[in-house]
Amino acid sequence: MLVTLPISELIPGMYVDSVVKQHESIDSIKIKTSGLVKNPSIVKRLIVEGVLELLIDFEKSDVSVPSKYRNKEKSQGKSEVANEVKPEKDKLTITVQQEFIKVNVVYDQHNRKLQAIYSDLTSGLTLNINTLKEIVDDIVSSVFRNQHALTILTRIQDKHSYNWRHMINCAIFSAVFAKYLGYKKSIVQEFAMGALLHDLGQAKLPQGIFSKNTTVSGSEAIVIKKHVAQSLGLIKGEKGITSLMMDMIVNHHERLDGSGYPRGISADKLSRPARIMAIVDVYDAITADRPHQDGDEPINALRYLLANKQLFDAELVQLFIKCLGVHPVGTIVKLTNERLALVLEGNNLNPIKPKVKLFYNAKHGHHVTPKDIDLSEASQKLKIIASVKPLDYQINLSRLLKEHLLL
């Protein structure tokens, strides 16, 4: 169980997951790592460093949850910040089709806004943080209505706008995952903002590195690694930037075995938000089309994350898969009856049996009358046998989504 506590209630035996709030006037240490509070001196040091609130993981703590937080959870039906992760079916306020109508246009608008901000920064202009906050507010509000609509839109690829689409997609995935993990809405917004900002520093680097259609050289890779410091420089002094956001920005390229950058720190110094950001960042990077590579299928990106337990938090990767599904929404899959279907809604209880919309006869190569199918129904015999690339069947994914989801 995760609970936010003020620093005044921190005692030895509690396990700190991350810093939620830190005094803005304190510049010494902005990023705090996770770990067990072993003695009172640690508490005093945190107070001196300006820490105001912390996220405590009582599953890893040596002390029990304070009674007032247990009682509060019972009376309100939820924790103040986050509940224990329970793989339940999402409580969606509207259908994916209804939400898709809302976000289909908004998603493109936000991409254009972020592109304009990116271009301004490249030209030496200052950051418009208020526009980014508006984008985050829209993303989080949509995710809490029905997260599947925006997640589907992340499947639409454009290799010439990867830089800003990657940031928006990471904000979407971070919001969806944080919501799944039980964080309250205000913390989900912090996750989304941290993800939206994490690569913004790339706008201050030579843009030719990102537009070339071949892999980067060793010297170019060294330049690219500077984007972390550039991102921090862009947000310095901006209001509303929290320790959680800075943690995600600074550490999204760090790895559990210490092989990451910029500091090469390892597992014991990497917080939960940093680990989440690393997973989301790599997942979207693998699945996205970029100037030098075509995006891979989501299932292969998930396999990569699973196979590299030395780099990524294995427990969080498993939860990420349960959150998105083995075949994430927006993926085209082939069924045992030789039909293609579009995944519309995941299944947290059984990730291999999502809700899909059958639309194409793969054997004879033609479209068929669309049909919604819930693969988790007891009477349903159809199963997914593979995920497929749209272009393998000359399918325009953007057009397909609009045909089947715009009522």
Image: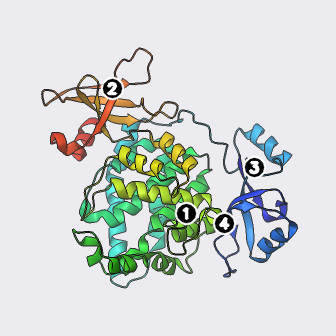
The disc label shown at residue 58, or none? 3
Of the 4 image quadrants, the one containing the C terminus is top left
Find out whether the residues at labels 2 and 1 contact each other: C-beta distance under 8 Å.
no
Mark 4 surroundings within 10 Å by alpha-carbon count, few (fewer than 14), some (14 through 19), many (20 or more): some
- Considering the numbered disc 3 on the image, is that residue within a helix, a strand or a loop? loop
Amino acid at circle 3: Phe
Amino acid at circle 2: Asp
Q: Mark 2 — residue?
A: 372
Report, in whole angstroms, how far the alpha carbon at label 2 lies from the one at label 4: 46 Å
Mark 3 surroundings within 10 Å by alpha-carbon count, few (fewer than 14), some (14 through 19), many (20 or more): many
Amino acid at circle 1: Asp
Q: Position of residue 346 (x, y in %)?
A: 44, 36
Q: Position of residue 23 (x, y in %)?
A: 70, 74
Image point 37% across, 67% down: which residue? 114
131 w.r.t. 102: above or below:
below
Nearer-the-camera pick, 271 or 221: 221
Find out whether the residues at labels 3 and 2 contact each other: C-beta distance under 8 Å.
no
State which tag comes first along the sequence, 2 or 1. Answer: 1
Q: Mark 4 — residue?
A: 33
Amino acid at circle 4: Thr
Mark 1 surroundings within 10 Å by alpha-carbon count, few (fewer than 14), some (14 through 19), many (20 or more): some
Find out whether the residues at labels 3 and 1 contact each other: C-beta distance under 8 Å.
no
Q: Nearer the viewer, mark 3 or mark 1?
A: 1
